[in-house]
Image: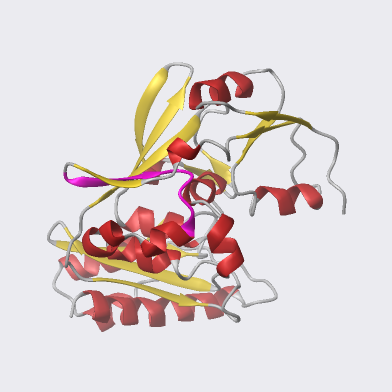
């Protein structure tokens, strides 16, 4: 299908993008386009203005910054997968990036676009949620920092202000701490039917769930059970608590609950071994 009519502007900087977003039109940012453009072709998204930030090469980087790793929002998945810094200091992000879509998607898709799009079947939001990542956001009032857990506004909705831009994502250094990202999908390039991220950090285990609700979720019941000394297999039985998995042509909600328990057990056994 052909998208609805829209205007198009190329942003020359982050500040310019913020200015264009404040034009008064229903504006959307365009980076890699793998999430937004299919919605526009189906006319599920009908922005009046596209603000292209894909040429802001200064937003593509992975660098050390104190006790965190700063990732430019326009860094493509292929670059994250190949980053020596991430492989050494936060390997779950590098590993997850190698599981996104297919090579064509990984060479064009950006991590910032995935976070801003907040598709509950996306890989990056879940991993960042398990890591307690932080977003650096720029808007008319300047820069602010936002925990990724507070950035989800609902299904395909972000809590960012319509005039705000996401230039950077900050993840903690986990080093050689245990981690795992277990993903189940029907074909290698498909969205996750269900996936589970487990990271050992801060004296405990953080567990994130993909495609078990309207947004990426933390498995609070699992984390509570582990903190109480329960073994991983028993803790994994609580993986579906507080979730609302969808039923679609890939799987029923009940099957997704079963997958969440199985994948959580596998992820915990790997992360905590």
From the top left corner, tell me how far across and down residue 130 is, in percent. 32, 58
Between 84 and 44, the one nearer to me in the picture:
84
User: Vertical placement of 209 versus 41: above or below?
Assistant: below
Q: In this view, does 197 lie to the left or right of 271?
A: right
User: Vertical placement of 77 versus 147: above or below?
Assistant: below
Between 226 and 99, the one nearer to me in the picture:
99
From the top left corner, tell me how far across and down residue 88 is, in percent. 22, 63
Q: In which quarter of the image is residue 134?
A: top left
Between 257 and 1, the one nearer to me in the picture:
1
User: Vertical placement of 30 versus 216: above or below?
Assistant: above
From the top left corner, tell me how far across and down residue 135 is, in percent. 37, 39
Residue at (85, 40) in percent of width and height: 4
Residue at (70, 75) in percent of width and height: 249
Query: Is residue 240 visible to the viewer in this orientation of the structure?
Result: no
Query: Is residue 53 visible to the viewer in this orientation of the structure?
Result: yes
User: Vertical placement of 45 versus 224: above or below?
Assistant: above
Question: In the rendered picture of this protein, how many numbered marks are placed on residues?
Answer: 0
Which quadrant of the figure contains the N terminus? bottom right
* 13 magenta-colored: no
Q: In this view, does 14 lie to the left or right of 134?
A: right
Q: In which quarter of the image is residue 144?
A: top left
Q: Is residue 103 left or right of residue 183?
A: right
| Residue span colored magenta | 67-77
From the top left corner, tell me how far across and down residue 169 is, in percent. 37, 43
Which quadrant of the figure contains the C terminus? bottom left
């Amino acid at each position: 299908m052909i998208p609805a009519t829209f205007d198009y502007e190329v942003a020359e900087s982050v500040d310019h993008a913020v200015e264009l977003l404040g034009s008064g039109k229903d504006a959307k940012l365009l980076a890699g386009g793998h999430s937004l453009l299919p919605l526009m072709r189906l006319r599920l998204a009908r922005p009046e203005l596209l603000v292209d930030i894909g040429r802001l090469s200064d937003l593509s980087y992975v660098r050390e910054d104190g006790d965190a790793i700063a990732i430019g929002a326009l860094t493509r998945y292929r670059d994250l997968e190949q980053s020596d810094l991430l492989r050494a200091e936060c390997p779950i992000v590098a590993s997850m990036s190698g599981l996104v879509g297919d090579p064509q998607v990984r060479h064009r898709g950006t991590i910032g676009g995935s976070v801003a799009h907040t598709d509950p079947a996306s890989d990056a939001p879940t991993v960042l949620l398990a890591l307690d990542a932080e977003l650096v956001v720029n808007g008319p009032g300047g820069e602010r920092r936002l925990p990724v857990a507070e950035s989800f506004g609902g299904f395909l909705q972000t809590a960012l202000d319509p005039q705000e831009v996401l230039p950077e994502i900050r993840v903690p250094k986990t080093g050689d701490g245990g981690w795992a990202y277990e993903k189940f999908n029907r074909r290698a390039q498909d969205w996750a039917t269900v996936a589970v991220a487990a990271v050992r950090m801060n004296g405990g285990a953080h567990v994130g769930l993909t495609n078990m609700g309207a947004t990426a979720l933390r498995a609070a019941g699992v984390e509570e059970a582990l903190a109480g000394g329960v073994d991983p297999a028993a803790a994994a039985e609580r993986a579906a608590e507080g979730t609302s998995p969808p039923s679609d042509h890939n799987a029923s909600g009940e099957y997704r609950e079963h997958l969440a328990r199985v994948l959580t057990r596998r992820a915990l056994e790997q992360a905590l071994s």
